[in-house]
Amino acid sequence: MEHTFILLLAFTAGILAGPITDINSRETCSTTCTDSTKFGYQPGTTYEYDYDVDTTTLIQGASEGKSGIRMTAKVQVEVLSKCDLVLKVRNVQLHERNAESPENFILSAMSGKFSQQLEENSLRFSFQDGRIESLCPADSETPWVLNIKRGILSMIQNTMENLQADQKVSEADVTGTCDADYTVSENGWYSVTIKKHKNLLGCTERHGYQTALQGTPYRVPSEIQSLPIMKSSHDCQQEISKSGILKGSSCTEQHVFRPFSRDSSGAMTESRQTLKYSNERTGVSTAKSVTRKADMNFEHHVDTASSTKARKNIEKQLVNICAQTKGDVRPETPRLFSDLVHIMRSADSQTLNDVYTNVQSGALCSDNNQKVRKFFLDAVPMTGTPASVTMLTKMITDNEVTGIEADMWMTTLAFIPSPSKDMIREVMPLLKKNGKALLAVSSLVNTYCKKTRCENDLDIANVISALEDKIGYGCYVDNNNKENIVLTLRALGNSGHTSSATATVNSCISRKDNPMEVRIAAIEAFRRASCDNDRTEALKVFNDKEEDAELRIAAYLAIMQCPSKSIITTVRNALEKEEVNQVGSFIWSHLTNLMESSSPFKQDIISILNSEYLKKEFDMDKRKYSRNYEGSFFLEKINTGASIESNLIWSSKSFIPRSLMANLTVDLFGKSVNILEIGGRVEGLEYFLESYFGPNGYFTEKDVKEATTQIVKGIDEKKMKKIDSQFGTGMDQLRGALYMRIFGNELSYNSFDGLASFSSGFNVLEMLISMSKNHDYTFTQNIMFMDTSMIIPTSAGFPLNLTINGTATIDMKASGKVDLRKLGTSPRSLLISGLIQPSTAVEISSMMSVDAFVTKSGLKMVSTVHSSTLLQGHVELRDGTIFNAT
């Protein structure tokens, strides 16, 4: 009996500890329910509305032409309970403006597909007496369908506390999270009329961007929270009965493209919505279980659907390119290339491989195949899809693309705006290479992880593990692996995910016999890392006064990436006891600049620093000691600013600077963009200079005495002899490195070791002999230098797309010879003969369109610049006189 009781008790406890909460959460969309009774929707009742939305795009004041789409539907709102409602859309039709008669609409050929997807699923939502708290869509609901339903629900939503007085509230709907001004315009016997106005420029969670321009979001209180390229207005009106039922709602939204507008004229898109009550009936359908939740904000997504006609379209475009590029570059050539890129974005990997096989064989173009092949290969890195990344990786690993072209291809990986998980897998073989491949792949990882949680991502872990393997256990460095280890550490810094490799990175830092550049690169590997990463080893280096000043300053900057109250206190205490002037002067200048900075990203640390007292006890002579320089401004009213920062760092072993960096960051409308950072370091330069200007150098003391008097005045000769005696036996060889970062991604790192690194084995005689022979030279390059789109959600849930593309084609044909071999002898003679035919075209196209996903409408503007010239000449000099010139 006792055992039975215990078993029963355990069984009961198991039930009580089971998924009761989960079951409840699956049965209702709302987790709470408000007690207020502003609205009076009756549970068990279905309310029906007629819905109509009309979007029109036109150039106001320029022409009568316009394009647009119109959607009509029956909307049903089922009330399951006071706070749990269901939206259903029925009888959907999609119309397009008639191209021959723009004032009239015709049924779209894609209306059936459009209505099928909108009507497929119902949408449960949490209704908190007017405020729509959350959505509970079906798993199969696509983002674009959900956005349209968000547009309908936005017309139903009213977030006022009551319907009697004007109010200003913050609310989230399909247009973003905005301040809404509610005004009671009419309070009659049977209904109340409410007007709502929004300043769309001040909304957050609104715009989406597809651009290579990468930034970090920030928040400041400002009326401008997005790029003010559009002049937008948003006004709605609701009629609510005294019984608390929505009788009608209408919204008008207007977007004028500012760059090409004047007053009310210019490129404009207007959206008009109406929702009218028709009837109500008793009864609701059985609602499906809740499986996921979403909010009311517009969901931005990238459509990566492949096309079954991709191969046919690509090959057709290449045949067209073959026919139209046999001569020089024509004005339409850039458009041929940009169209090819956009068509290739719908192709899968197999399709691209099949097309390339045909291109290689000459099956598509026999008499102009080299140029067609060049167009196709130039388009591959510009496409930015998983399929193109697969082809890019294969061609580089198979050495079909090498040298500078391979480096350019790999660099494009850092500018893919929305990398996918498949891309991360595809680029793994590139890690077997070194150099730019490591920096490119790590940049792609960082971009991917900005939009996706990567802490437990196996593919990201594999990338980091592959990089870690290149360093090796214990981080033992010699002349053979030094450069690869430095590049790998810098790639880890690029990725921003060093947590699993922390032990290896710390080994590189702590091993004191490692070269200085390796230890510094290891410390800088934390530059993008999460604040959860262990920086204990960097803190030890900072506190070790026996370490070189350059290394300690690098460690200080690493721990200041995550400034907390305890870190600032540690730094302040260390600063009070600091004996090395190089370290003390840098920290003092850095903290002082932080307290005076206007950068929105540094405001949190300013509040911590203001409570700390810093003593100034260091020589701040700019000619001899390390310093941080910073200049910044930020205009909160227009949400715009910029900052320039530079570090000039000296070493304890040198009387001239060891490293220098400069960084430019621009803050624009909620996005901070690290435009450019360049820097470098050099070792052994002081001894290199001494070999030329020292007592036994190439230049005598008399030659340089006057020029160097002021420079060396502050240098004590006894101290210099002490330095020579201490470090003379291990005199540093001249070596160094330069790096460049764009948008925070390190894209270039070049090192040199000794003067021999600058010698390329250039032979003047061989060059002159080669030039004296006839040569034919051709060069063609296509580039899409701009490919940006801005997505603005309209109140109807349709995205308003602003796209701008810039494409350039350069072609160069040259032939001839240049014989200069006897120019220096007597009698002098030379021969220059040849022709050069450069041609180029640049096209910039912009489009403003409303996308209904099965169709779109809008307008397009194209500007083209074209140039084609031919230069031919012949100059011959014999016996010192001109023999022939044409």
Image (cartoon, rainbow, N blue to C red):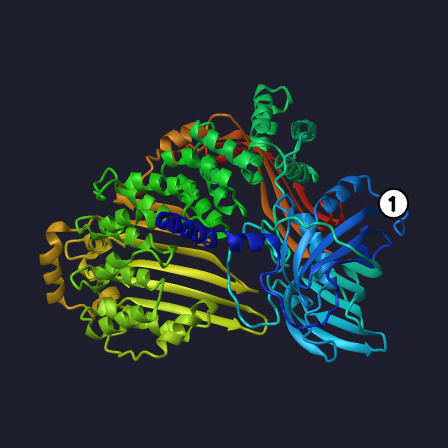
Residue 853 picture location, percent across and down: 71, 45
> Which corner quadrant holds the C terminus?
top right
User: Which residue sits at x=63%, y=69%?
Assistant: 34
User: Which residue sits at x=45%, y=67%?
Assistant: 601
| Mark 1, residue position | 106
Horizontal side of 449 relative to 237 (left or right) equals left
Residue 553 picture location, percent across and down: 27, 62
Horizontal side of 537 relative to 560 (left or right) equals left
Q: Secondary structure at mark 1?
A: strand
Confirm whether residue 621 shows in the render.
Answer: no
Horizontal side of 664 relative to 570 (left or right) equals right
The residue closer to the viewer here, 768 or 738, is: 738
- Res 614 quadrant in image: bottom left
User: At label 1, which amino acid type do we have?
Assistant: Ile
The residue closer to the viewer here, 322 or 184, is: 184
User: Which residue sits at x=46%, y=72%?
Assistant: 598
Density class for disc 1 (Cα within 10 Å; few <14, some 14-19, many ≥20) is: some
The residue closer to the viewer here, 684 or 859, is: 859
Residue 341 picture location, percent across and down: 62, 37
Task: Give the vertical position of 64 relative to 814 (above or below).
Answer: below
Task: Give the vertical position of 652 relative to 368 (above or below).
Answer: below
User: Which residue sits at x=68%, y=70%?
Assistant: 159
Task: Give the vertical position of 314 relative to 215 (above or below).
Answer: above
Confirm whether residue 812 shows in the render.
Answer: yes
- Res 383 quadrant in image: top right
The residue closer to the viewer here, 834 or 723, is: 723
Horizontal side of 314 relative to 18 (left or right) equals right
